[in-house]
Structures are given as C-alpha cells and as structure tokens.
Image (cartoon, rainbow, N blue to C red):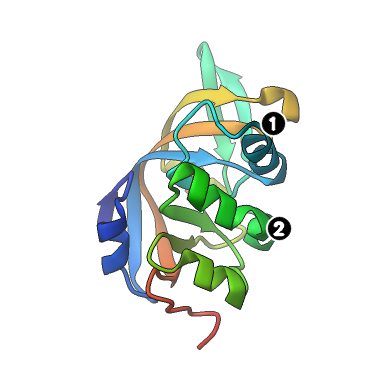
Amino acid sequence: MELELPLERREVGRLRAGDVLCLSGTLVTARDRAHARALELGCAPVELKSIYHCGPLVRRARGGWEVVSAGPTTSARMEGYIGSMLELFGTTVVVGKGGFSEKARETLRDRCVYLAFTGGAGALAARAVRRVVEVHWLELGMPEALWVLEVKSFGPLVVAMDARGGSLYHR
C-alpha cells in the first residue's frame, strides 16, 4: 500500500500492526540532538508530523544536496522525547528501527503509528529520496540536523506499532 504524507490521525487509526506500506511526501530526519533542541525551543523550523529516526549521509551535489545513504537509527534512543513530540508537534508517523517500549506504545495510542525500516538498508532508503528540500540545524552535525526529504515509495515499511495499541514487538 502506498500512503501520502502527512498522515492525519484518522488515517493512522486505520493501520494495523503487520501492514506493509510505502510512503511518499515529506519526511524529516531527526535524532537525539534535534529532538532535544526542538523541545527546548518549543518549536521547529519545519513541520514535524512525519519523523524519520535517521542520520543520513549527505553530500553536496549540483548546487544542492544528495542523500547517499539514509538507513534508520535505533528509535529507543528517542523514546524519552516521543510523548512531548506528539503533544507539541502533532507527530502522526515515526519511522525507525528497533521499536519502543510498552510505555511508549501507550503514548502512541490514538495519535501516532511507528513504522519499522530494515537496518542496513541505507542505500535502498536513499533511492526513494527524490530531493533534499531543505536542511536545518546543520551546526548540530550532518547526522543530527533536520533533513527535510521529499520521498517517493519510501519503504517497504512495516507497521510495527499501531495507534490501537497493537505491536509486533509485544506479541
């Protein structure tokens, strides 16, 4: 199934743990330092409805940026931020690897879906990136910056934790 970002809560509510899908639209990478900065500031320079836990490898090319690799990073590192991100930014989609705990699963309920991307497949992920729309907070370092990516058929992704409390990690 192909879904267009951003996803609204009603769309998220239809997804079930185990569904396989691809995403198209705008996806923003964010890791530890970007989460911390956004929450410290209480705002972000871009909409954070669709977050990808990723520290991409990016190079300058043709007057812009080219994503060379964009594999997921371990989402558990960002777990302490997830509730605040949902509250402050209305995040409805989080993509990463490894999942979240039982407590975070309850935090996602009725608000957000967690999609798992296969670790080690950074080159595959990069192929789905059509362009880098913009980058923010580059002073945090390349992997920690907010990379705003336009993606097409990004995936395959597995709904690992759905908005109804279903989880592939807790079955």
Quadrant of residue 79 within the rendered picture? bottom right
Q: Position of residue 18 (x, y in %)?
A: 38, 76
Marker disc for residue 86: none
In the displayed structure, would residue 14 be above or below residue 126? below
Q: Amino acid at mark 1?
A: Met
Q: Amino acid at mark 2?
A: Arg
Q: Position of residue 116 (x, y in %)?
A: 50, 64
Residue 72 visible in the shown view: no
Q: Position of residue 1 (x, y in %)?
A: 25, 61
Q: Which residue is mark 2?
A: 77
Q: Which residue is mark 1?
A: 142
In the picture, measured across the screen, residue 15 lies left or right of residue 135, that is left
Q: Residue furthest top?
A: 63
* Foreground pick, 144 / 102: 102
Give the secondary structure at mark 2.
helix
In the picture, measured across the screen, residue 13 lies left or right of residue 59, that is left
* Residue at 60% over, 42% down: 30
Q: Residue furthest bottom?
A: 171
* Residue at 42% over, 67% down: 158
Whichever of labels 1 and 2 marks the residue nearer the N terminus, that label is: 2
* Foreground pick, 20 / 28: 28
In the displayed structure, would residue 95 be above or below residue 66? below
